[in-house]
Image: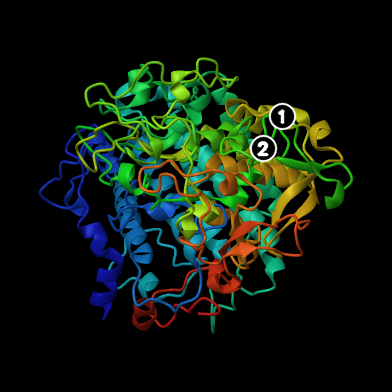
Amino acid sequence: MKTIINKIFLASALTLSLSACSDFLEKEPLSQGTEAIVFKTPEHFVQAANALYNMEGWKNYDNKANYDVMDRNLDISGLGSNGGGSAPESNWQWDKPYGHIRTCNILLQKAEEFGDKDAIAQPIGTAYFFRAWQHFYLLRLFGGVPIVDHVLDVNDGVIYGPRKSRYEVANFIISDLETAIPLLPKETDIPASSKGKVSKEAAKAFLARVLLYEATWEKYVPTINYDLDGNGNESGAGTAKPEGYYSIEKMLTEAKKLSGEVITEAETGTFKLWNECDSLSYFYLFNIDDGAENIPNFRNAGKKTNKEFILYKKYDYNLGQGGINLSHTVATWQGSNISTSFGESFLCRNGLPIRISYTGNMSDAQDNPQFEGYDTFVGEFRNRDYRFVGCAMSIPDRTFWSSRTEDGRQLTAAGKPYPDPVFPQNNDVYNANDPAYKSSCGVFKPTLRNNSTASSYGSRKFLIEGAGRSVANSESADFPLIRLAEVHLIYAEATCELGNGSISDEDLNFSINKNRERARVAPLTNALIANVWDAGWFDHATGKTICKKMNMLDEIRRERACELFGEGFRLDDLKRWGIAHINLTGQKLGHRILGTAYETEKANDANYFGEPCYYPEKYPLLYGIYEGTGPNDPDYGRSIATLAGNLNFSQRDYLQPIPRVQIRLNPQLKQNPGW
């Protein structure tokens, strides 16, 4: 049985191969596995460290398209069931990280036997970093797990041992990262040929992420009134805390300090928000491709101009493509959507919500003066956050440069993928005569022909544009793992948590207001939101729109949702804030239909040309229209996106179950509570 268990822990590591080239992007395998490497020179350690970059990117650890990282089926995207079910027999999300941890431990074990530690400091630091990375992956999913800090053999006690508590795992991760930081080079000391390797700043940023995550988990998750730790004997991993374990305040303080150090370094020019494509920079940031059919390259703004990604999964059009067909899966709405409640939460450019009140009463709420309403299909996109405008798929009168001809999107000939000009002639003023805004059908008028189009906006984030792109799965945009904008958000949230909901304008300007500036949104200040209520706040607890007084913590969380949408943070954020079981249950509402352009306009896309945009006699909505208490109800006339019974996320779902095969092989692994 020991041999069987050993294989479960180690099999994936035995098949990993190292690069034969100093450029760790290239994937030429050696004839033998990692453990066959001879560690005799510093170059051998560098080579071994190159094999540690086993992060999920466009593909997950199971070598399948990584659509889950796009925040699918959550409150901000297309809604579906994210709970229920029973514990699976096996789960690659448990198995694969331990294989990657083994490769880290092999390098660290060999380093102990090597004389000149200074000569191999960077590989050692890299191994500590990725050992922490993989343990954090497990912590986020399962809570407490077995800690593997050395190379296991079939007689090792860890194989038959119990899980460590989440607090012991968090402490181990923090320790590994604190060890890694002084061993790693500054970003400015990494040569151009090695860009993409882990830097000192990447380790600081990741540690700040871990500290903020665990601090807020420990602060808010106890409020859900469900014991996720268990006692470690009958269920769960227990509550043991190691000596010297950081308090919540200490973790937040360190998160602020570390993120602040990275931001300060960025201000010297080491990192910066990518802003090479004017008002659409946020959109194009995520699809800087090395293929010919790429707008940033068309504007001489290729990958070398991107200093925002602090750590990323490297791809190359010739050496290592992404291997998934985003231009089809995202463009046809099979990827993440932007839910209606999320889309409406994006601010107007004056920094306030689309609907506001100065008394807190819904009866005297008013539209933001910059919001142009729903009388036309273009109104709601005017004067809005460019993170919304740039990533929404179906903005009626913006040309979408792809190979699709339907829905009024212009197709240009291969060989000349982009007409000129591509972007608005004036970024801040809409001009209907600007060719960059014109689609082949003038203004796209949709048909509500299914529940998806009635409940959400299509999202084109990550979608690489390119007319007539002939080779499927050839996208080669780098995949962001840590970027400067997230560090701004970490700093702001940690600061606000430390201030019990307060944060100074100076700290806001140092952090998230830089993100807002790129999005063309006014700076967040204390004066801006004083005595203002968001009268369009969707309350997931009741499934209705309410009037909620604006506050700094809510606004920082709003910024986090808008900036990091589709990058795999949302579920973790909802859980660590203790609201996942609220936001992922209950009835959800979709687009406003009654009294809007859907009732007055006719479709002009190829398949439904001339039909009413809202045509329930022919295309009934799956769940119909919400009428509430009548026309004065703030949600009257919306589509019903999903029913409460369709969403089953509960408190137990904050942690995934331990695979059943693991518990059979090691009875000391106790199942998470509720599973």
Residue 581 image offset from top left, x and y in percent = 62, 67
Residue at 53% from the left image edge and 71% from the top image edge: 646
Q: Quick check: 614 above or below 201?
A: below
Question: Is 83 on the left-hand or right-hand side of 95?
Answer: right
Q: Nearer the viewer, residue 414 or 500?
A: 414
Q: Could you tell me residue 33's position as x and y percent?
A: 17, 53
Amino acid type indicated by mark 1: Asn
On the question of residue 191 being in view, the answer is no
Circle number at residue 347: 2
Is residue 641 or residue 482 the one in the foreground? Answer: 641
> Where, quadrant-wise, is the N terminus in this rendering?
bottom left
Return the residue nearer the eye: 372 or 445. 445
Give the CA distance from mark 2 to mark 1: 8 Å
Image point (83%, 41%), residue name: 532
Looking at the image, which residue is at 37% across and 16% down? 420
Q: SS for tag 2?
A: loop
Outermost residue, right direction?
359
Residue 58 in the image: x percent, y percent?
34, 46
> From the viewer's perspective, is residue 494 above or below residue 168?
above
Element on which disc 1 rests:
loop
Tell me if mark 1 has few (under 14), some (14-19) or many (20+) residues whose alpha carbon lies within 10 angstroms of its own.
many
Circles 2 and 1: CB distance less than 8 Å? yes
The kind of residue tagged 2 is Leu
Tag 1 residue: 350
